[in-house]
């Protein structure tokens, strides 16, 4: 009996270190899992596809296809959700990577081919073969990094840390883009004034083509329009009306899309009347008229819907 008890105690003593070792290993394994999960979350959150500045097509789907009211969202979900998913795939694997090619080329040129006085002409000339061989590798690495992660997009425009001295009128008169963008990023319903926003659009909109719309945030004219979208005064209303009813500008452009969205969000009989008037402007392209028509379809105001219905009935008669 005594020998059995001693053997049991000895066996228990040998097993305790093993249990402690297993417990420590399990604790280390759990800590490693937590660390890996944190790394994964950080990597995913840093992906370029989660930055709205890099999702041009998704933003367009959200702006033009997703209704504002909940019943309409549920009704049209089978349409805009698949389209949005396809737009997200195209943004991630086509549009954004293609936009990063010029930036990657510039980085490659700056890093490998720009002449430096410190290295000297002989060193620069003697390393041409090596730099030529390494250029494709460097370009591919930089292009993949810019395409995949937030913060490497050289096209983004950041506001200066401190506001430059002077008034908004001074910035506009001298063409001080950093100062204008600083104030436009922080625009309110009162400042800058609507008149100054319209002048800003007139001064800088010509610099921004539809092909460069992804970089529009660096253009004061584009940012001025975004501020005007939030205004409720008569001058803003007339500004967007003039953009849509201009017979000399019949092609669908970014400013037309913003004007249509402005009136769609107004969602009133008066706003619907402007869109219907724009449909009858001679010289408008089919694409522009189709966008205007979609804006009318998304209106929920009863007075606006009655006006649209009467217009359809008169056209049919």
Image (spheres, grey):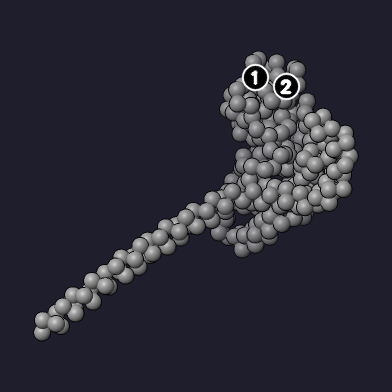
Which class describes the residues within 10 Å of circle 2: few (<14), some (14-19), or many (20+)? some
Q: In this view, does 227 lie above or below 252?
A: above
Question: Which of 49/276 is in front?
Answer: 49
- The answer to which quarter of the image holds residue 213 is top right
- Mark 2–mark 1 CB contact (< 8 Å): yes
Dot 1: element: loop
Which class describes the residues within 10 Å of circle 1: few (<14), some (14-19), or many (20+)? some
Question: Which of 154/52 is in front?
Answer: 154
Residue highlighted by disc 2: 176
Q: Where is residue 58 in the image (x, y as percent from the top left)?
A: 66, 52
Residue highlighted by disc 1: 164
Furthest-left residue in this view:
1
Q: Quadrant of the C terminus?
A: bottom right
Question: Which of 182/264 is in front?
Answer: 182
Q: How many marks do you count on the picture?
A: 2
Does residue 301 appear in this view? yes
Q: Position of residue 123 (x, y in %)?
A: 85, 38
Q: Residue at x 71, y 33 (%)?
A: 218
Q: Position of residue 236 (x, y in %)?
A: 67, 30
Q: Is residue 103 above or below residue 10?
A: above
Q: Which residue is drawn at 52% across and 53% down?
A: 39
Label 2 or label 1, whichever comes before in sequence order: 1
Q: Residue at x 77, y 28 (%)?
A: 204
Q: Is residue 275 above or below residue 225?
A: below
Dot 2: element: loop
């Amino acid at each position: 009996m005594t020998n059995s008890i001693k053997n049991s105690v000895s066996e228990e003593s040998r097993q305790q270190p093993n249990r402690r070792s297993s417990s420590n290993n399990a604790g280390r394994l759990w800590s490693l899992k937590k660390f890996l999960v944190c790394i994964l979350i950080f990597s995913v959150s840093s992906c370029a596809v989660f930055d709205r500045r890099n999702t041009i097509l998704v933003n367009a789907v959200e702006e033009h296809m997703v209704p504002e009211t909940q019943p309409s969202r549920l009704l049209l979900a089978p349409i805009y959700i698949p389209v949005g998913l396809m737009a997200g795939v195209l943004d991630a694997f086509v549009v954004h990577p293609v936009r990063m090619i010029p930036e990657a080329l510039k980085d490659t040129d700056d890093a490998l081919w720009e002449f430096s006085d410190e290295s000297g002409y002989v060193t620069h000339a003697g390393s041409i073969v090596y730099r030529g061989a390494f250029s494709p590798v460097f370009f591919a690495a930089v292009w993949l990094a810019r395409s995949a992660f937030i913060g490497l997009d050289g096209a983004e425009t950041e506001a200066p840390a401190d506001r430059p001295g002077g008034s908004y009128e001074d910035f506009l008169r001298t063409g001080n883009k950093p100062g204008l963008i600083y104030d436009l990023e922080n625009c309110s319903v009162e400042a800058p004034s609507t008149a100054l926003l319209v002048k800003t659009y007139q001064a800088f909109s010509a610099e921004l083509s539809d092909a460069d719309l992804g970089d529009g945030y660096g253009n004061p004219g584009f940012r001025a329009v975004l501020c005007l979208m939030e205004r409720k005064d008569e001058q803003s209303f007339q500004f967007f009306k003039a953009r849509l009813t201009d017979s000399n500008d019949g092609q669908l452009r970014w400013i037309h899309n913003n004007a249509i969205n402005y009136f769609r969000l107004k969602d009133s009989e008066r706003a619907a009347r402007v869109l219907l008037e724009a449909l009858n402007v001679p010289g408008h392209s089919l694409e522009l008229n189709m966008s205007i028509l979609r804006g009318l379809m998304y209106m929920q105001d009863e007075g606006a819907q009655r006006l649209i219905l009467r217009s359809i009935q008169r056209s049919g008669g």
